[in-house]
Image (cartoon, grey):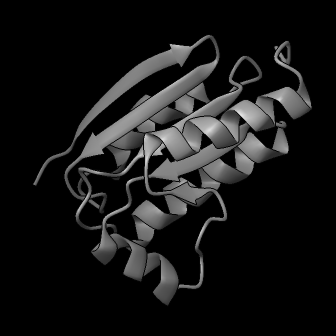
């Protein structure tokens, strides 16, 4: 299987990353190649839109949590949206449900608006 990953800058320093396909041993590197360059001091937030992901393996979980930890360590936000039920079950099974998981992009936007207001828009 393969994965397609699109990246869109929603506003300066805020990115939406939308993978389509499974995140597993065969595909995690393609996702990492798109997401890793965005983990830097200029990034305020990353929204991972999981609507197109129907399976995630342990290596995919590891990638997501590595990115989440790196972003939060630099004061940036990481949120996940539109996580499919079968993928949510995997997060629950390993007891790694991110607190910033939202059903819609609108919910994520509201969260990020409040977050960026708290940390200051001129974070960069």
Q: Is residue 48 above or below residue 66?
A: above
The quadrant holding residue 31 is top left
Left or right, 89 with reference to 25: right
Question: How many numbered discs sit on the rendered protein?
Answer: 0
Left or right, 43 with reference to 49: right
Left or right, 41 with reference to 52: right
The quadrant holding residue 11 is top right
Q: Is residue 7 above or below residue 36?
A: above
- Residue 45 x/y as whole percent: 65, 32
Q: Nearer the viewer, residue 97 or 62?
A: 97
Q: Is residue 26 above or below residue 16?
A: below
| Residue at the image point whose x is 52% and y is 56% from the top | 102
| Residue at the image point whose x is 30% and y is 28% from the top | 6
The quadrant holding residue 24 is bottom left
Picture quarter with the C terminus: top right
Left or right, 120 with reference to 112: right
| Residue at the image point whose x is 58% and y is 35% from the top | 109
As drawn, which residue projects farthest toward the left?
Answer: 1
- Residue 47 x/y as whole percent: 52, 39
- Residue 16 x/y as whole percent: 46, 30
Q: Is residue 74 above or below residue 29?
A: above
| Residue at the image point whose x is 89% and y is 22% from the top | 120
Picture quarter with the N terminus: bottom left
């Amino acid at each position: 299987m393969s994965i397609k990953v699109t990246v869109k800058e929603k506003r300066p320093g805020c990115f939406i990353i939308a993978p389509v396909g499974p995140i597993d041993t065969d595909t995690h590197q393609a996702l990492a190649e798109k997401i890793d360059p965005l983990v830097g001091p200029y990034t305020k937030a990353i929204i991972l839109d999981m609507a197109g992901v129907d399976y995630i393996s342990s290596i995919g979980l590891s990638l997501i949590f590595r990115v989440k930890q790196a972003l939060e360590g630099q004061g940036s936000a990481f949120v996940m949206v539109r996580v499919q039920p079968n993928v949510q079950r995997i997060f629950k099974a390993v007891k790694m449900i991110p607190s910033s998981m939202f059903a819609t992009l609108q919910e994520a936007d509201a969260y990020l608006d409040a977050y960026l207001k708290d940390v200051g828009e001129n974070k960069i």
